Image (tube, coloured by chain):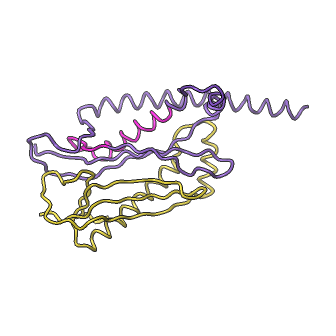
Chain colours: A yellow, B purple
Amino acid sequence: MNAAMILTNVEIVPGRSIVEHYGLVQGSTIRAKHLGRDIMASFKNLVGGELRGYTELLSEARDEATKRMVAQATELGANAVVNVRYSTTSVAQGAAEILAYGTAVRLE
Amino acid sequence: MSDLVFEAAVTVVLLAAGYLIGRRVELLHYRSIAEREGTWLPVPAVTARTLHDPRPVVESRLVVGSVVVSVDFYKRFLMGIRTLIGGESVSYATLIDRARREALLRMKESCPGADLFLNCRLETASVFKGARGTTGSVEVIAYGTAVRFET
């Protein structure tokens, strides 16, 4: 990820001031689970608890969505994205969509 | 007839395994949550969007913590009965409670130097739902803005 890009989920970047707004930027990815992980998960379904494979899968997906959002912001010439939101939707059987969106801004 | 007995026996074994192992896992998890929540107590995670602190901010960034959980066989069985008679389901509530607190702790643990977490959000989504023969699992995401003050 672009290290210079600052992300926050409030309207401002605390301690910095915003000089320009570029509008909404977003990034999304759809991930399907694979069979190996699914077999482990169905075993886990017996005893309950955390499904580590899925946790990893979804956090990788979220990183990817964030990266795409940041890429869009970079293209606009922004150096921060404020008010970032995440949302997860189950779009198809065995697949989930992760969406990240926010407002691209330029800081002083 | 023997098929029926066999099926009943398998169900009982699964229920017992789900109950015993599930309860053990839950107990250990709650113990770990309580301990970690204690260590993170001085660093509050607030839902406020604005900062009411005069100290200058050195750094702020987005932090995320997430966890995917699934319910055990015994709890699913209880839920089956529960949907017949209605009312609160305690067994599912504890699972989601564990997931939320775990996600929040992971969020905090991803930024050890923070002094405050602003605008913390908890989002629960039912993911990978609908595939035949599988139980949908629940994902909890906790995210917020970590703030570090000048010391």
The one nearer the camera, A36 or A85, is A85
- Give the quadrant of residue A91: bottom right
Q: Is residue B50 left or right of residue A35?
A: left
- Give the quadrant of residue B46: top left
Taking the spot 60% from the left edge, 47% from the top edge, the residue there is A41
Quadrant holding the N terminus of chain B: top right
Give the image location of residue B126, x and y in percent. 52, 47
Q: Is residue A18 magenta?
A: no
Judged from this view, the residue extending furthest toward the right is B1
Quadrant holding the C terminus of chain B: top left
Total number of numbered discs in the rendering: 0
Residue B99 to residue A22: above or below: above
Taking the spot 20% from the left edge, 65% from the top edge, the residue there is A21
Give the image location of residue A26, x and y in percent. 36, 64
- Give the quadrant of residue A81: bottom left
The one nearer the camera, B47 or B75, is B47
Residue A52 to residue B9: above or below: below
Give the image location of residue B150, x and y in percent. 11, 46
Taking the spot 12% from the left edge, 40% from the top edge, the residue there is B53
Bounds of the magenta span?
B95-120
